[in-house]
């Protein structure tokens, strides 16, 4: 790590996890813990828990978990060092300067790529201002009618016709060929070197922390492709970035507008609709939806009104709904896109279009109905079957019934017939109205091969260190499944009173699988509605789990035992175990 364990501990202890997570997730106190909707997967019933006593979080739906540092790493896509620095600044703790070299070594590639992209963005912006032909500026100010303020706000730039301009500039700044190639901004092979972007207007793509992570470029002329994006690299995952979200997340408007591209977002922001965002040259996906859910509960689809825009809306709606978002669709009343509508009708009229936005599901039924000839009975039947299929997406019975009522009324399908058809289809899928879960259920079985009783036993020991000596008189750390659980058992045996869940998780900040397994164990028993154990119940549970663990260890040894005498002794020991009184001696 870049910083000492003492420094990391100081920063972590200075940042209460409930306070930090509350800035991003609405939490409600329930018993000893706080609960809210998980920011890492879509859900409608809170399964995301935050424990003030353990200073850790865990989602009983998707398994995400960790301490305050790993939360920022997951939520903000930070490296460990970036998360630590952000928390240090929040707590007004000055990190030691002598850790900078180590920090550079451990997260050097990401940091260097961020520096490179920042330098490239400045270069493109300067080229736009200096361009003698004014091709870029003529397009942005003449064709697109953008103001100087908007151009500066979004950091728009220009890549000239010289295909090595950026490469030569960045080489002068000391960036290596290897880094330039990895960024995707330069294409380097044995025979030639050239910039990925030239003769294009440039759009810096920023993450939610206003750091340039990639670029989009719109060609000047008729060359193909018309729009070109940076390839993915260690700081850019296009399925996890939404253009304009770095600005839109600070908007005072309660909903976000989902658009089709760069210019839609920029034009809307210029018109005062600072809540507009767009996906980047890829189909809208679950990661995008979860990203939106962090900042809003409502999304309005404002993609173009042509066939491609309609398909984009139809594709995005179920994904957004699954993420727990309220989704509506704006009617552009004949205009191709929001920019054209505002130019023709003005911002006040567009504001009215937002206010009149229609429920996305009911809009979707009309959109797909346009593809059926309803004068043909066979086509009408297929349309009704399409309606039934779409209604099956609603998992909550009350919500589903409300949509059945509305669909019945708007599409002139008898309510009971429609309800029966939906229920029949769900039953054929081996579901029923009562059994469709609103979120993934927590399994009591094993996770990554670890039995539930092992996780429960170690969790209870972490919460009740006074029982450690008594428990470990019966069992050994090596009785547990896998090195991760064995190491945790060793810690709880040797340091029962000083064990700290949040501090222990620091060792697994960048090992997501290990962290999830540990959090699933340390957080179990803290589910919504779970009652705390009494002392008698706790002791009974510990004894039962000790017996299960010892039985499993004996079974494993019996399975591989080739010595008849040893096999007989093990069988006898197993039989005696079932009758033996296990005393914890506390």
Image (cartoon, rainbow, N blue to C red):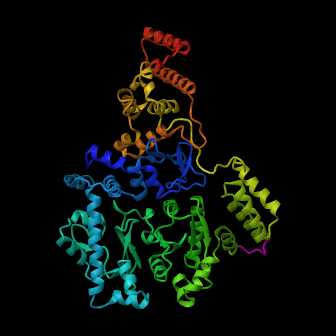
Q: Is residue 192 above or below residue 507?
A: below
Task: Work out whether residue 510 can be spotted.
Answer: no
> How many numbered circles does the render carry?
0
Q: Is residue 285 left or right of residue 143?
A: right
Q: Quadrant of residue 364?
A: bottom right
Residue furthest to the top = 565
Segment tinted magenta in the rendering: 371-376
Residue 469 rendering spot, x and y as whole percentages: 41, 22
Q: Position of residue 102 (x, y in %)?
A: 22, 51
Magenta-colored segment: predominant secondary structure: loop
Relative depth, front residue between 252 and 560: 252
Q: Is residue 375 magenta?
A: yes
| Image location of residue 512, percent across then percent down | 41, 46
Q: Nearer the viewer, residue 329 or 152?
A: 152
Q: Percent x, y for residue 468?
A: 42, 25
Q: Residue at x 26, y 87 (%)?
A: 130
User: Is residue 444 positioned above or below 251 on the image?
Assistant: above
**Does the magenta run of residues contain 463?**
no
Quadrant assignment, res 490: top left
Front residue of 199 and 78: 78
Residue 348 shows up from this direction: yes
Residue 254, picture quadrant: bottom right
Q: Residue at x 39, y 33 (%)?
A: 488
Tell me: residue 232, above or below residue 478: below
Q: 426 left or right of 186?
A: right
């Amino acid at each position: 790590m870049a910083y000492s364990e003492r420094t990391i501990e100081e920063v972590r202890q200075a940042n209460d996890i409930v306070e930090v997570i509350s800035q991003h997730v609405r939490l409600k106190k329930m018993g000893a813990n706080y609960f809210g909707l998980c920011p890492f997967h879509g859900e409608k019933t809170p399964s995301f828990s935050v424990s003030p006593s353990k200073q850790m979080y865990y989602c009983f739906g998707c398994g995400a978990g960790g301490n305050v540092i790993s939360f920022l790493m997951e939520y903000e896509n930070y490296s460990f060092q970036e998360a630590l620095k952000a928390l240090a600044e929040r707590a007004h703790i000055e990190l030691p300067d002598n850790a900078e070299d180590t920090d550079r070594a451990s997260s050097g590639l990401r940091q260097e790529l961020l520096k490179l992209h920042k330098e490239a963005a400045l270069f493109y912006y300067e080229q736009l201002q200096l361009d003698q032909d004014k091709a870029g500026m003529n397009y942005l100010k003449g064709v697109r009618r953008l103001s100087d303020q908007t151009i500066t706000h979004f950091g728009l730039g220009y890549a000239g016709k010289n295909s090595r301009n950026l490469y030569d500039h960045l080489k002068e700044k000391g960036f290596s060929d290897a880094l330039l190639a990895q960024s995707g901004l330069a294409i380097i092979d044995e025979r030639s070197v050239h910039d990925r972007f030239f003769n294009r207007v440039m759009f810096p793509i920023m993450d939610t922390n206003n750091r340039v992570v990639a670029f989009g470029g719109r060609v000047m002329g008729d060359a193909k492709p018309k729009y070109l994006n940076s390839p993915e690299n260690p700081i850019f995952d296009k399925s996890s970035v939404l253009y304009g979200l770095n600005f839109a997340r600070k908007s005072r408007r309660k909903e976000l507008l989902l658009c089709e591209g760069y210019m839609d977002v920029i034009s809307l922001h210029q018109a005062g609709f600072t809540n507009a965002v767009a996906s980047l040259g890829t189909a809208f996906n679950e990661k995008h939806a979860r990203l939106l859910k962090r900042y809003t509960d409502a999304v309005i689809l404002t993609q173009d009104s042509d066939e491609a825009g309609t398909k984009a809306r139809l594709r995005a709606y179920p994904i957004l709904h699954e993420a727990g978002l309220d989704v509506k669709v704006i009617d552009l009343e004949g205009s191709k896109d929001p920019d054209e509508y505002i130019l023709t009708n003005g911002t006040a009229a567009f504001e009215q279009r937002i206010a009149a936005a229609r429920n996305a599901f009911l809009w979707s039924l009309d959109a797909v109905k346009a593809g059926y000839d309803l004068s043909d009975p066979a086509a009408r039947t297929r349309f009704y079957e399409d309606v039934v299929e779409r209604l099956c997406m609603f998992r909550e019975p009350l919500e589903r019934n409300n949509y059945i009522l509305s669909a019945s009324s708007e599409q002139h399908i008898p309510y009971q017939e429609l309800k029966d058809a939906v229920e029949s289809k769900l039953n054929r899928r081996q579901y029923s109205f009562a059994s469709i879960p609103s979120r993934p259920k927590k399994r009591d079985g094993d996770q990554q091969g670890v039995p539930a009783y092992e996780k429960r036993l170690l969790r209870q020991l972490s919460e009740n260190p006074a029982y450690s000596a008594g428990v470990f008189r019966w069992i050994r750390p090596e009785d547990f499944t896998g090195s991760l659980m064995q190491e945790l058992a060793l810690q709880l045996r040797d340091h029962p009173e000083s064990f700290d869940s949040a501090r222990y998780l620091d060792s697994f900040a960048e090992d997501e699988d290990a962290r999830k397994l540990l959090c699933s164990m340390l957080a179990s028993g803290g589910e919504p509605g779970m009652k705390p154990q009494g002392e008698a119940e706790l002791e009974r549970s510990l004894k039962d789990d000790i017996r299960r663990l010892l039985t499993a260890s004996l079974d494993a040894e019996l399975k591989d035992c080739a010595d008849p005498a040893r096999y007989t002794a093990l069988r006898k020991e197993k039989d005696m175990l079932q009758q033996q009184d296990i005393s914890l001696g506390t």
